[in-house]
Amino acid sequence: MYKDTVVQQKAQESKPKFSLASFFSSFFKPHFSRRIAMATAAPEEPSPTNMLMYALPHQTDRLLQYSFPGKPESSTTTTNLPCTITLHGHACFVQGNSWIMREDLDDTNFLTKRIPDVTSIERIANALQTDIGYELPPEYQAGAGDTYFSGKMLAKLGRIILITQELTMLSEMKSADAVQDYYVHENKQDVTEPQAQDLLTALQGVDLPTETEISNAMTRLRDALTVWITADAKTPFIYDVSWGGIVSCGCNWNGNATRGFCNNRFPDCPCMQDAGMNFGNGFYNDHHFHYGYFIYSAAVVAKFDPEWGRKYFERVLLFVRDIANPSFADQYFTVFRHKDWYLGSSWASGTATLGGEPFLNGRNQESSSEAINGYEAIGLYGSVMVTAFQLAEDTEQTKIAAEVRDVGRLLCATEIRSADRYWHVLHGDDAEHTIYPSEYQPSAVGMMWNTMVQFQTWFGGDPFLAYGIQLLPITAASERRDGVKWAQQMYPDFANSCEGSDMCTNDGWSVLQFYMLAVVGHRTAALKLANNLPLEVYTTVGGNGHSKTNTLWFISTRPDVEVALVTDTDFVIPEHHVKEYLTDCDCPDTCTNAQLAFDASGNSCESRIKYLMNN
């Protein structure tokens, strides 16, 4: 990772890197447990009168009538004073010098707490035979691509490895009792003896990747990630002294899809001059999206290679500090760069302007789900590193890793709750949960601004895009994120839009449609449809963060639904949905994957070419 070497070293060595005390005052102790965190912000010298302040719906949902022992000023009470209407619903007065809110924190799990549907095992095993050989495109392996798609592809390989390892381990168990003990030990759901035996039987009937294939996949992931987080990347990460953060230098790629070079070198960094390059990474746009994928990938590598994890802990921690630094004592990184603690969610936009002026509607965030993924990744990484440092008997680093884990869990939990309130829209009998006027008919917000919401994305107005961008990637946090009640309301509109457009399948968005079909109660049909998707969809701009293995795995582990949504499950992918597009303009030597992935005012060059060909 480039930069002025002295500042780089100081940024790595600055202490405390993760000290909860400086941000959370004292409100984790003694009120923090494995599942619950109590959060307050009590003033150092309590005022003799209780403060009045507006609370938003997601806050009043969780405000507790509670006081700390010896601190009666920490109580919170609602009032009968009139509420006022805001973009985020009715804001109502609460009285109290501190707010105490309860957050339920999930355990850190990479995959799922549930046993996979045994009817899916053969399909997943077949998918693994191809997916285990997945390689990033050469320019991305060299650290020359953009940080968004590179991170997605690294995390994609990481999930393929995780699923392979999980199934391999289960297949080697000698009895149903061993399977049951494993699920109990891993804090997963109880598995009955017949379920465990059926799973073992299904696994004995399939071929899984060999140990060598798994090792090779891990080597590819570890090597590619190491390139990106060290100075070996063609487009290195650098420390920006102006705003205090890690940004990509950027690469002006000169070559084709298999061979080429960046015709710029640090300190010539196009990313810091062009707000449209790399989705605005040099201007702090979407850092929690981009870096979340890198942190997730690091968590996977460290899980299976603790020595690597310990060696590169400080390097990876730079990305964590960039998006989730909790310490005011850290002089190199701002505190919680994207998080809006009052709103509960994050803002993705950075310092970019419109014609030199701030955006009239303020800051914005498009993908609530990628914000969740970024914070989920921090929790996973911290959890893995706790184990890595415990193995090395390093008590001090274990404590730091535990704080990284818990910061990630809290960020993830609050992001999910706010997404559920402000991005997921319910209608009809559930309208009391909805904060938007009845005139707003979609079941999701595509883009949230300070002063408005939109049902569209930066890269298109199709409904399947606005819905889909709230659903990727598919990870363990997706189950809590995608409530069944909301899923059953949004699915018909999502499906109608997706099935009515060639772009939905051609650009990879139907992966998410079939995943949601399982969420609303049609797991068997979803498995069949997802299995029939052409592999090409997993190389598209909308699908390159997914894999067939991951799609089938998470469909197969969706819970049963008490009342399944009544919907058409006989959808057949038409032939014209799987046709291939000549997106390189018949110039493969110059119109490379890297060129096609470049950002063009919020959309990739490839997707813009496809849009023109479709319209």
Image (cartoon, grey):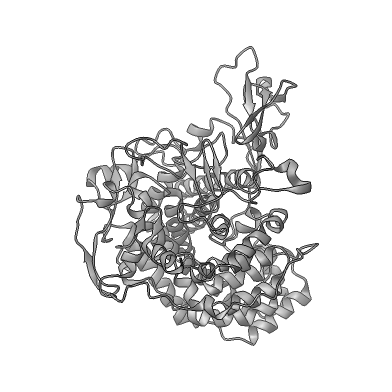
In x, y percent, where is residue 310?
Answer: 41, 57
Residue at the (22%, 45%) spot, across then down: 4
Residue at the (36%, 49%) spot, across then down: 280
In x, y percent, where is residue 117?
Answer: 69, 74
Q: In which quarter of the image is residue 233?
A: bottom left
Judge from the rendering whether residue 266 lies leftward or rightward of residue 450; answer left or right: left
Note whether residue 159 is visible: yes
Judge from the rendering whether residue 133 lies leftward or rightward of residue 439; answer left or right: left
Residue at the (50%, 68%) spot, across then down: 503
Quadrant where the N terminus is found in the figure: bottom left
Q: Is residue 429 above or below residue 341?
A: below
Task: Name the foreground residue: 407 vs 334.
Answer: 334
Q: In which quarter of the image is residue 216?
A: bottom left
In x, y percent, where is residue 388?
Answer: 47, 58
Judge from the rendering whether residue 250 lies leftward or rightward of residue 182; answer left or right: left
Task: Name the foreground residue: 369 vs 274.
Answer: 274
